[in-house]
Structure formats: structure tokens, C-alpha cells
Image: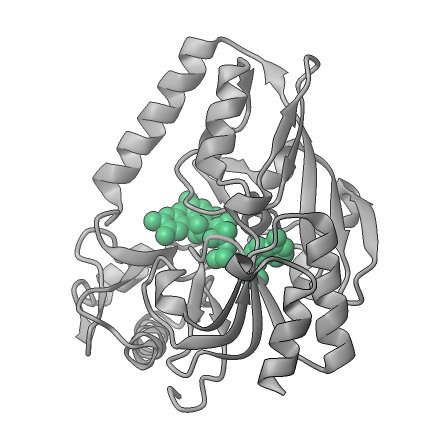
Amino acid sequence: MEELFYQKLLRIMPENQVKLKESMDKHTTLHIGGSADYFVTPAGTEEIIEVIRLCNKEGMPFYVMGNGSNLLVSDDGYRGLIMKIAEDYSQEWIKEDGTVIAQAGILLSKLANRIAKHSLTGFEFASGIPGTLGGAVTMNAGAYGGEIKQNLISVKVVDTDGNVLTLRKDELELGYRTSILQKKGYILLEATMKFEHGNQEEIFARMQDLNRQRREKQPLEQFSAGSTFKRPEGYFAGKLISDAGLKGYQIGGAAVSDKHCGFLINKENATAKDFVTLIQEVIRIVHEKYGVTLEPEVRFLGDFRREA
Ligand SMILES: Cc1cc2nc3c(=O)[nH]c(=O)nc-3n(C[C@H](O)[C@H](O)[C@H](O)COP(=O)(O)OP(=O)(O)OC[C@H]3O[C@@H](n4cnc5c(N)ncnc54)[C@H](O)[C@@H]3O)c2cc1C
């Protein structure tokens, strides 16, 4: 069965884009996670669609990821196929009138630089978010008062049956760290955005300033998935966790960052079990002290029954 499915994948894409038993700690910024049975890195739209159709036909579970900067993969890994849409699918086209079309796998840092080089303003906020455009649209990523939603015009997605759809922004149900892509399992192929012309020097200066603020406040030198929890209405997760006395609190190799309590980090070879246990403990203690229920922003992938 394993051999057969592998051969079928090789009919869709070259051997160097298909891996068996790929360890997911290499593909997540947390550096945690067991292996995926199959791991593919498509380089074209047809490959993405064909892989989805093959998985459906063969009853193979599949999951799409970008840069793995918001993902916690279980210690047992993933029984199925993971499709990483990243640098091999990352072209962008920038037009005179400020319209930008980009493929899902482009890194936000790279896209922000390209947009700035064209003296377009509005994407500076995204330059320090370490994800792909696919992950960012799905999560409606945001920072420093900006959100992906603001400049989006439309997206091209594939549904779970392999059909390509074009959706306008108002059809995307974009909310705080949520979108219809998450709810329906749509896969982002490309997004069209529109930006205003601005002063190039000021745009680069703003990006540098935001990235300096990040370096000062966030533990960028440690393995994390960014803010582990969503912002609870009326509060800041980091402040609640800090006020609860949990700064530096550690379980196994996972810890609450000393620098920013909203970031849980992989401090010393943490397992997914350490990380999940820490998340649960933080939620429990914060709820006990302040009656606020923190909700994880990080996405869980795989079977966590062993970790629970
Ligand atoms: C140091 C650090 C700082 C961070 N700062 C911020 C911040 O300021 N603001 C913020 O919003 N986030 C932040 N994050 C979290 C993360 O970078 C964002 O959520 C980012 O948008 C995730 O993109 P990704 O490509 O890494 O997605 P992944 O982690 O690979 O996946 C995240 C989700 O997106 C889905 N997905 C990925 N690609 C696609 C696709 N092509 N089609 C459909 N679904 C897809 C996955 O299935 C998963 O559900 C930070 C993370 C780190 C490590």
C-alpha cells in the first residue's frame, strides 16, 4: 500500500519533491513533531490539485502547511500526507497601479520587501511575521494594527475535492485569526491585494522600526510558534500569564518565555507532550486566577491522545 501510493505520487511530481517518513521537527519553528507518512512540496497548481484528488481517491488523509510557524505537530507525527506549500510555489506579480498577485508559498518577509521596493505602502506590518502568505490568509495574520484582511481583494483556492474557486474578500469571513479557509479546509493558491503608493524610504524605515520592536519584546532567538494564545477580549494573554506568576514556568523542555509571557517556547528539546501539558496548565491557572479562558492560536496537527 505504502509503496503503491508513493509510486502514484511520483507520477504527479519528481522524486525530490516527495519524501517518506519526514520528520516534522525540521519543518516547524517550534522544532517539535514526529514524522509524516508522506511529505510533498508541490511546485505548481496542477501538482497541488492532482495530489488532493489522489488523496481523495485513495482515502489518504492530508494536511496543508506553509512555513510551520503556527503549528504544533504531535510526537506521533501525522498518519497521512502533508503538503508543504512554500518556496517552490512563491511567485509574485506587482503592477503599476498597486495591484499585487502572489502565490501562497511566498514568505511574508520577502513579499513585504518586494512591495516596499515598488514604493507601495500597507504591508509593512507583515514583514516580521515568519509565515507564508497561505498561512497568513488562513489565519488572517496581523500585527501592530495591521491585518492581512485590509489589502485583500480576492483569493484563488482549491476546495477539498480539488475544484478551483475564486472568492472575493467579503466571502472570506475574515475575523480575528480566522477565515473561511480554516472552516472549510480550502487551500490557498494565490491572493490578489491592492496597495497605495507611498514614500519608499518611509516604508523601509517603518519596517525596520517594527522589526526592532519585535526583537526587543519577543524571544526571537528561541524556538516558538509566536503568541501561543489568541488575545482574549479585553485582556492581553501575555499580561494575564505574567500576572499569574507563570513567567519562566517550565514543564519538561517547554517553558513560558521570560521575555514575553505570551510566547511558550521549546527551551530544551521539548516534546509535543511537554508543550501541550504546558498549554493546559497555563489555561488552567489563568482561568483559576482571573476567570478568563485562554484559547490557543497555535494549530494542532496529528493525534494528541498520547499527549493528553
Ligand atoms: C516568532 C514568531 C512571531 C509571530 N508573530 C506573529 C504576528 O505578529 N502575527 C500573527 O498573526 N502571527 C504571528 N506568528 C504566527 C505565524 O507566523 C502566523 O500565524 C503565520 O501566518 C503562519 O503562516 P505559516 O505559513 O507558517 O503557516 P503554518 O504554521 O504552516 O500553518 C498555519 C495554518 O495555516 C494553514 N495553511 C498554511 N498554508 C496554507 C495554504 N496555502 N492554504 C490553506 N491553509 C494553509 C495550515 O493548515 C494551518 O492551519 C508568529 C510566529 C512566530 C514563530
Identified at 52% across, 54% down, the residue is 66
Viewer-side residue, 177 vs 76: 76
49 relative position to 197: left or right: right
Vertical arrangement, residue 176 with respect to residue 184, above or below: above
Point out the residue furthest to the bottom here: 306
108 relative position to 271: left or right: right
Identified at 37% across, 80% down, the residue is 75
Please say whether residue 172 is visible from this viewpoint: no
Q: Percent position (x, y) of residue 93?
A: 65, 26
Identified at 61% across, 49% down, the residue is 43
Q: Quadrant of the C terminus?
A: bottom left
Vertical arrangement, residue 46 with respect to residue 32, above or below: above
Q: Percent position (x, y) of residue 86?
A: 53, 49
Q: Quadrant of the N terminus?
A: bottom right
Q: Percent position (x, y) of residue 276?
A: 36, 77
Task: Name the image quarter holding residue 70.
Answer: bottom left
